Image (spheres, grey):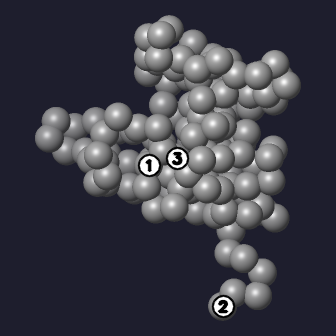
């Protein structure tokens, strides 16, 4: 992402974004099943995030970290989910692939659509996700 494409984030949002980025870095080095376990625990008690809330968190993460602004999709997606959680909401965290040509990717989505991604819906096939927790009272 070019510097011109990065968004300015209010000062009050920078520290939580930096914290989410810092926590996401070692998590991104874990095995996929452990990442899923940690994120499943982290989402507990959160409400589903809206696309607007998720985009705001993604922009804050990208603004706070050059790595997340570039090719660090796993760290960026984890940090975005964690920042959303700090705000009381949870997007759906996803990892997946495309086959022609092969490429793996990690992203967040809300309201059933990828948020902040340059690719159209369905470009990547999800293989693993951590959706928002079910609401209390729902069957």
Q: Residue furthest bottom?
A: 139
The spot of residue 58 in percent (x, y) is: 59, 34
Residue for badge 2: 139
Q: Earlier in the sequence, mark 1 or mark 3?
A: 3
Question: In this view of the protein, which residue sits in the foreground, 109 or 40?
Answer: 109
Q: Nearer the viewer, mark 2 or mark 1?
A: 1
- Residue at 51%, 61% (x, y): give it: 111
Find residue 57 and report its horizontal and vertical position in percent: 66, 37
Q: Is residue 139 left or right of residue 88?
A: left
Residue 114 disc label: 1
In-image side of 132 versus 3 (left or right) = right
Residue 37 screen position, x and y as percent = 67, 55
For residue 72, say whether it is visible.
yes
The residues tagged by marks 2 and 1 sit, at their Cα atoms, a distance apart of 26 Å
Q: Is residue 88 left or right of residue 133?
A: right
Disc 3 + disc 2, Cβ < 8 Å? no
Is 110 above or below relative to 87?
below
Q: Secondary structure at mark 1?
A: strand
Q: Which residue is identified by label 3?
A: 108
Residue at 57% in and 40% down: 55
**116 or 83: nearer the viewer:** 116
Q: Are marks 1 and 3 in contact (CB under 8 Å)?
A: yes
- For mark 3, give the secondary structure: strand
């Amino acid at each position: 992402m070019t510097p011109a494409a990065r968004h300015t984030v209010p000062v009050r949002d920078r520290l939580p974004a930096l914290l989410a980025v810092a926590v996401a870095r070692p998590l991104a080095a874990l095995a996929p099943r452990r990442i899923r376990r940690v994120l499943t625990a982290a989402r507990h008690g959160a409400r589903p995030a809206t696309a607007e809330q998720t985009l705001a968190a993604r922009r804050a993460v990208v603004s706070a970290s050059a790595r997340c602004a570039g090719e660090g999709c796993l760290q960026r997606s984890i940090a975005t989910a964690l920042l959303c959680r700090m705000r009381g909401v949870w997007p759906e965290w996803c990892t997946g692939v495309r086959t022609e040509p092969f490429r793996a990717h990690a992203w967040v989505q809300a309201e059933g659509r990828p948020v902040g991604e340059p690719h159209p819906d369905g470009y990547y096939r999800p293989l693993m996700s951590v959706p928002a927790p079910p609401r209390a009272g729902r069957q």
